[in-house]
Amino acid sequence: MELDELTDAAFKRNIRESDYPGLDILPSNLAYRNFDIALDRMRKSRKQLRWLLGDLGVDYDFIVLDCPPNITLLSENVFRASHMILVPVIPTRLSERTLEQLFEFFQEVELPTEMIVPFFSMAQKRNRIHQETIARLPERYPTFLRTVIPFTVEIEKMGLRRMPVLAYGHRLPVAQAYSALCQEIQERWEQA
């Protein structure tokens, strides 16, 4: 997609069906590497993604946007186009600081912090720092989900197998954790 072709029609044209019923994807590729630049050139650049995705809501119940863990014009567009911001948090001090900065940014630009829904990921049961962080952070951030995704090599195997862990190992503890996480997200969504 070229910069001058940043339209809802271009998005629709690039959407692909996946191997899983009811799941379509807009594959990442190098054509999107200058997305921030394209947004910056537009009027009302902080709200363009919401507009671009507007028509897709007719065809989809949910649109999940995956973005890098930094705050750019693109991520601000994602924030403004979203109803819920799921934030995986590794239970470490660095991830805690990143989450803190995200909340500060939302307050600065007057976005509702209730949209931020963090959950712990890559947690190690035997790591004392992880356990202390998992016990402490939900008190500070009440929107934290209860489900904790454990650290496991099975997650890395998804890339090798080119399928989600639930597709090949639904009985694995990490697959059960992801199922619980999805259920908790759905419950939170219905409460909103």
Image (cartoon, rainbow, N blue to C red):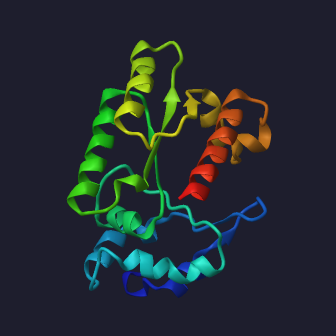
In the picture provided, is 186 more to the left or to the right than 40? right
Q: Position of residue 174 (x, y in %)?
A: 66, 31
Front in this rendered view, residue 37 or 103: 103
Q: Position of residue 181 (x, y in %)?
A: 62, 41
In the picture provided, is 170 more to the left or to the right than 47? right
Asked if residue 27 is positioned above or below residue 120 in the image, the reply reads: below
**Residue at 41% over, 28% down:** 91
In the picture provided, is 98 more to the left or to the right than 142? left
**Residue at 20% over, 58% down:** 108
Q: Position of residue 20 (x, y in %)?
A: 76, 59
In the picture provided, is 160 more to the left or to the right than 87? right
**Residue at 29% over, 48% down:** 103
**Residue at 51% over, 34% down:** 121
Q: Position of residue 34 (x, y in %)?
A: 34, 70
Instruction: Locate residue 98: give its quadrant.
Output: top left
From where the camera sits, is residue 1 visible?
Answer: no
Front in this rendered view, residue 75 or 6: 75
From where the camera sits, is residue 75 visible?
Answer: yes
Outermost residue on the left side: it is 108
Instruction: Locate residue 58: give its quadrant.
Output: bottom right
